[in-house]
Image (cartoon, grey):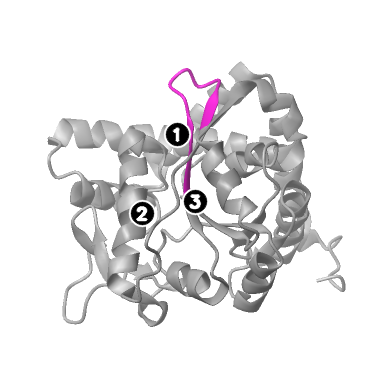
């Protein structure tokens, strides 16, 4: 990555996007919300593929909602994720200290007690639109490492990783299992979000909103390899659109059980409970049900 010529014209659009993110991070709060909402509404109107994915996910997960309410939730999801772009820019480009007055931390004693055991902690996070800002604000209370998926563009990857390394103790590639285990065994908190579909090879099928979903086995595997407590955590934007809540829950016990399906279902159940509190803030734009059981047709 260090040998890349980032001055090459092919990287100019990426530099422009990075510049826009820095600009967005310093906008007044009300203007951030306005711009974020505009981005979300534009994507809702024109990103038809992502809208189809979101509509499919919400139809599967909230069959009890009528067509009008599902349609409103689709729109609200795009708006929330548009605002999330502005929040990500803020988390990556500014010192989180300036937002300390906007965040409330509930249940921090659960994480403190787990940390006091001295075996490291695996924190189970969720892909809400607020994820990166949540990580930045969480760092005001507990230093933590984060597991992430590298970006395909090398310039944006460098920008993103540097930002996350500033926020977190270390940003760890999701393929670097040894690195995750090493950091936990050294006593660190590692934040990991296991709620996406990474394919059949690393997953078992477990229910998610009543639908069989490919659910990665790594949460239980890491816990088994390290002996670390697993602490669920949720982070959301409050209805005033100005403040945030971080909420730690009691550690999962017993966990792992040795039953990969039961362990994955346990993690999914927590994630589902968190999503139901603020469903519009979840990343429904991801193909959560992409991998299907053998012989079952795809949803998308």
**Residue on which the image places disc 1:** 80
Give the mark nearer the N terminus: 1 vs 2. Answer: 2
Q: Position of residue 250 (x, y in %)?
A: 44, 46
Give the residue displayed 18% in from the left and 56% down from the top: 210
**Residue on which the image places disc 2:** 49
Distance from disc 3 to disc 2, alpha carbons, whole Å, reads 26 Å
Q: Return the residue nearer the eye: 240 or 4.
A: 240
Mark 1 residue element: helix
Q: Position of residue 277 (x, y in %)?
A: 33, 34
Distance from disc 1 to disc 3, alpha carbons, whole Å, reads 18 Å
Q: Position of residue 71 (x, y in %)?
A: 24, 35
**Residue on which the image places disc 3:** 125
Give the mark nearer the N terminus: 3 vs 2. Answer: 2
Q: Residues within 10 Å of mark 3 (few under 14, many from 20)?
A: many
**Does residue 24 lie above or below 131 as drawn?**
above
Label 3 vs label 2, nearer the camera: 3
- Give the side of residue 268 with respect to residue 138, left or right: left
Q: Which residues are magenta?
A: 232-245
Q: Residues within 10 Å of mark 1 (few under 14, many from 20)?
A: many
Is residue 238 within the magenta segment? yes
Give the residue displayed 64% in from the left and 78% down from the top: 178
Mark 2 residue element: helix
| Residues at circles 3 and 2 in contact by the CB criterion of under 8 Å | no
Mark 3 residue element: loop
């Amino acid at each position: 990555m260090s040998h890349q010529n980032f001055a090459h014209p092919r990287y100019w659009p990426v530099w422009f996007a990075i510049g826009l993110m820095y600009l967005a991070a310093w906008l007044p709060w009300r203007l951030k919300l306005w711009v974020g909402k505009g981005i979300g509404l534009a994507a809702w109107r024109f990103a038809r593929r992502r809208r189809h994915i979101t509509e499919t996910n919400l139809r599967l997960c909230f069959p009890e909602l009528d067509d009008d309410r599902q349609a409103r939730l689709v729109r609200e999801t795009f708006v929330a994720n548009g605002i999330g772009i502005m929040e990500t820019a803020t988390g990556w480009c500014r010192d989180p200290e300036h937002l300390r007055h906007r965040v409330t931390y509930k249940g921090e004693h659960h994480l403190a007690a787990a940390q006091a055991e001295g075996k490291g902690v695996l924190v189970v996070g969720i892909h809400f639109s607020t994820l990166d800002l949540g990580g930045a604000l969480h760092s005001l209370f507990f230093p933590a490492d984060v597991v992430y998926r590298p970006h395909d563009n090398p310039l944006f990857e460098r920008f993103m990783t540097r930002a996350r390394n500033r926020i977190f103790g270390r940003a760890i590639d999701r393929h670097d299992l040894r690195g995750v285990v090493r950091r936990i065994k050294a006593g660190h908190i590692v934040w990991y979000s296991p709620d996406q579909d990474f394919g059949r090879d690393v997953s078992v099928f477990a229910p998610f909103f009543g639908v069989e979903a490919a659910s990665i086995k790594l949460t239980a595997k890491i816990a088994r390899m390290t002996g670390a407590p697993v602490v669920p955590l949720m982070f959301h934007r409050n209805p005033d659109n100005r403040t945030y809540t971080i909420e730690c829950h009691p550690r999962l016990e017993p966990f792992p059980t040795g039953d990969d399906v039961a362990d994955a279902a346990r993690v999914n159940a927590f994630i589902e409970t968190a999503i139901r509190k603020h469903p519009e803030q979840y990343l429904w734009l991801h193909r959560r049900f992409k991998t299907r059981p053998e012989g079952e047709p795809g949803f998308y």
